[in-house]
Amino acid sequence: MLTAGPAPDIPLEDWEFFITTEGGQRHTWSWDSFMALPQAEVHTDIHCVTSWSRLGTSWRGVSLDTLFEDVDTRSSFATAHSYGGYTTNVPLDDLLGGRAWVAWEFDGERLDRAHGGPARLLVPHLYFWKSAKWVHGIELTQDDVPGFWESNGYHLHGDPWREERYS
Ligand SMILES: Nc1nc2c(c(=O)[nH]1)N[C@H]1C(S)=C(S)[C@@H](COP(=O)(O)O)O[C@H]1N2
Ligand SMILES: [Mo]
């Protein structure tokens, strides 16, 4: 599967990234404060659950480790929320340790709207439906709450090497 619903249009001056914790704290970044964070270059393969893989893609963005630096949480799970309403659940451990980014550049160009611009989640070690396009923020949860595709029969975790496709 590819994209559910139309691509939302988010002007950079309205864009915001949030992380909310189980205790009710809300951390937010404007586009400018997000761009002022340390930026990472990522070279990786990506795998869609239905058919395709793309080898050797290049991205630039901010590591989730950077965004979580000041976040105090005891949650084990996260739900990524996208502009437009898409959600996907990921264990918090899969977002940390240099394995996930909020990416805004693809192959040297600004990420275009069709592919999730201004910014998308990039979690390349999981199936690509976890890489939420038009990402708005991360909600931390104590329980693993199925997101959009996970509620429609796809796997809660989605590791391509274990072929975790369907639940
Ligand atoms: N917001 C949002 N993100 C999404 C999706 C979606 O429907 N909505 N589809 C997912 C799926 S199934 C895939 S394979 C990739 C497709 O990304 P691409 O359009 O850049 O190839 O986005 C993922 N992220
Ligand atoms: Mo997909």
Image (spheres, grey):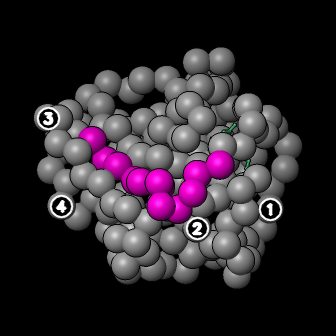
- Can you give x and y, in whole percent of width and height, for residue 99 in the image? 47, 62
> What residue type is disc 1 on?
Arg
Query: What residue did someone put label 3 on?
Result: 23
Q: Residues at badges 3 and 4 in contact (C-beta under 8 Å)?
A: no
Asked which secondary structure carries label 1, the reply is: strand
Please name the residue shown 34% across and 71% down the image: 33
Q: Going by the image, does 101 lie left or right of 73?
A: right
Compare residues 142 and 39 and report the one nearer the observer: 39
Badge 2 or badge 4: first in the primary sequence: 4
Q: Tell us which disc is closer to us: 3 or 1.
A: 3
Label 2, label 4: how far apart the Cα atoms are: 22 Å
| Cβ at disc 3 under 8 Å from ligand 1 | no
| Cβ at disc 2 under 8 Å from ligand 1 | no
Q: Going by the image, does 34 lie left or right of 102?
A: left
Query: What residue did someone put label 4 on?
Result: 70
Asked which secondary structure carries label 4, the reply is: loop
Label 1, label 2: how far apart the Cα atoms are: 18 Å
Q: Going by the image, does 103 lie left or right of 160?
A: left
Badge 2 or badge 3: first in the primary sequence: 3
> What residue type is disc 4 on?
Asp
In the image, residue 27 lies in the stretch drawn in magenta: no
Compare residues 6 and 158 and report the one nearer the observer: 6
Viewport quadrant of the C terminus: top right
- Can you give x and y, in whole percent of width and height, for residue 14 in the image? 47, 54
What is the number of the mark on residue 54? 1
Query: What residue did someone put label 2 on?
Result: 104
- Can you give x and y, in whole percent of width and height, for residue 5 in the image? 73, 31
Badge 1 or badge 2: first in the primary sequence: 1
Compare residues 72 and 97 and report the one nearer the observer: 72
For residue 71, which quarter of the picture?
bottom left
